[in-house]
Amino acid sequence: MLSGTRIICLLAVGMLMLGFSARVGADPLMVKTAQGKVHGKMINEDKVRAFLGIPYAAPPVGELRWKAPAPPVPWKGKREATKYGAHCMQGPVFADMIFQDGGESEDCLYLNVFTPASADEHSMLPVMFWIHGGGYFAGSASEPRHNGDFLPLKGVVLVTINYRLGVFGFLATSDLAKEANGAAGNYGLMDMVAALDWVHANIEKFGGDPKNVTIFGESAGSSAVSTLMAAASAQGLFEKAIGESGGAMNLGAPDTPSLAEREQREQDWVTSLGVSTLAELRDLPAQTIAEAAQRQGAPGFSPVIDGKLLTEPIAATYAAGKQAHVPLLAGWNRDEQFQLSVGMTAAKWKEFAAQNYGERAAEFLSLYPGDTDAQAARSAIDYNSDTFIAFGTWKWIDAQTRTGDAPVYRYHFEQPAPPSKFHPGWFAFHSDDIEYVFGTLDTRPGADWLPEDRKLSDEMMDYWTNFAKTGDPNGPGLPLWPRFDKDGTVLHLDNEITAGPDTTRERYEFLLKWMPKPPARP
């Protein structure tokens, strides 16, 4: 006869065995979200679980076109999450943008979750939330260079998202403003906030910590990060921010136009389509609208001070210290653009300086020297890069350093990429950093990477994921990355990683005062 103590012990063992059996028998690719179950797949030799094409909002079609994202529609049973959702309506598309999804659609508000195979709902790993670039008019989370095969191996959960682009994401007309109590535009930014809300509600089930989210992006995605830091509705949804080559405080123009500046111009464009009401506009096929938005004379569509998501110029929000006070890691590439350097000579560069800066040409040439043809070509690249995107990134970092009350780390990416199908060789060109950050070098067609490229990629992945974990990119085996907000030190990401003083401030302060609008080419 068993004693009471032995019975209790046997029952306890039985319960443990039942629990173990339940865990062993559970499908690690099945996760229950707030909307329903999703079934993913294993990738990267079964080291990472991928859940693709998860809806984070209702399809923005019909009556929901040009409205704030509505909650995703629940489903019964399991939803296969093994393929990317469609990329959003867009255009024109950059040559190096390769999509792995099934095509273009207005029904595109999907996200993807990549998590270590060993993670479960108790892991509480830091979350990295990626916003793709593309000028707010192109791009997709399904691009191979954004693949999630490798970052999760550094101990993070990766989320990549689609968001509405171009005319579908940022149309701001007087009729839309009347319909929404005075606010119009910024639907793409609202999508990002909705996706962050989804992450907070669901990411724990995938192994992520909803209280440790880092938003990061490149180009327009980086500009979006700087904008979300200024948007009250996004604050509190992330704890850290990373920006790669982009900021909302642009050179030579207000950082974000007002609704009044946009709505009449865009209302006139809508009228040119032959419609007179919002109902008629929403009845037009998405492809008709997308093609019309790319015709000559069509207005550009981008973020706007809508009075709701953004209530004032972004620079004003930062100046007043009302942005998110979160750690920031940001920087840009050495050769963001280089077209101005083609055929450049010392004589042409001096002519360029005289034409554009007149009596201040000598000061310009002291900052962008051109005593030899080679020096002139290098300065042309620097100027081209600065006026294209580096200045806006610098201005954001500078603003956050002044009022952000949180650590700031600044980098300069200088590793020249080898020639490939879509990229000229031996420049650290705009977007060249992406594959290094994601560890996806081998997704770039035709590139013959060197061992030092792979080493730098691994180091950058460590820096980025360390920052996502703790707000500090430093860690064992990495060259020290000092805080920029403490002593103005910049980390130079090249074959050999080094840290040194900021040598560009004088250029940007000069451009802030004297740059002509727009810059001319000789």
Image (cartoon, rainbow, N blue to C red):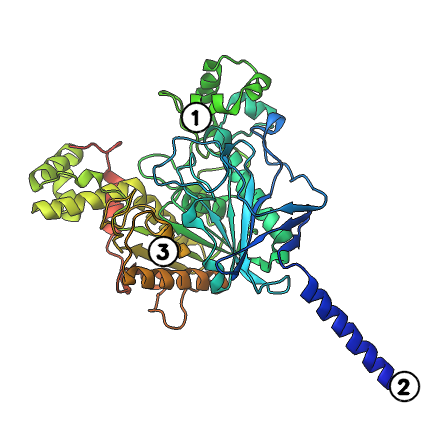
CB under 8 Å between callouts 2 and 1? no
Depicted 405 relative to depicted 74: above or below: below
Of pointers 2 and 1, the one earlier in the residue sequence: 2
Number of the front mark, 1 or 3 = 3
CB under 8 Å between callouts 3 and 2? no
Q: Is residue 345 visible?
A: yes
Q: Mark 1 points at which residue?
A: 261
Q: Name the residue under label 2.
A: 2
Q: Which of the two residues, 319 or 222, is positioned nearer the viewer here?
A: 222
User: Can you name the residue that lies furthest to the right here?
Assistant: 1
Residue 258 percent coordinates (x, y) = 45, 30
Depicted 20 relative to depicted 234: above or below: below
Horizontally, is 508 left or right of 250 in the view?
A: left
Q: Distance of mark 3 from mark 2, alpha carbons?
A: 64 Å
Q: Can residue 319 be seen in this view?
A: no
The label shown at residue 436 is 3
Residue 462 percent coordinates (x, y) = 41, 64
Q: Distance of mark 2 from mark 1, alpha carbons?
A: 85 Å
Q: What residue type is labelled 3?
A: Tyr
Residue 111 percent coordinates (x, y) = 55, 45
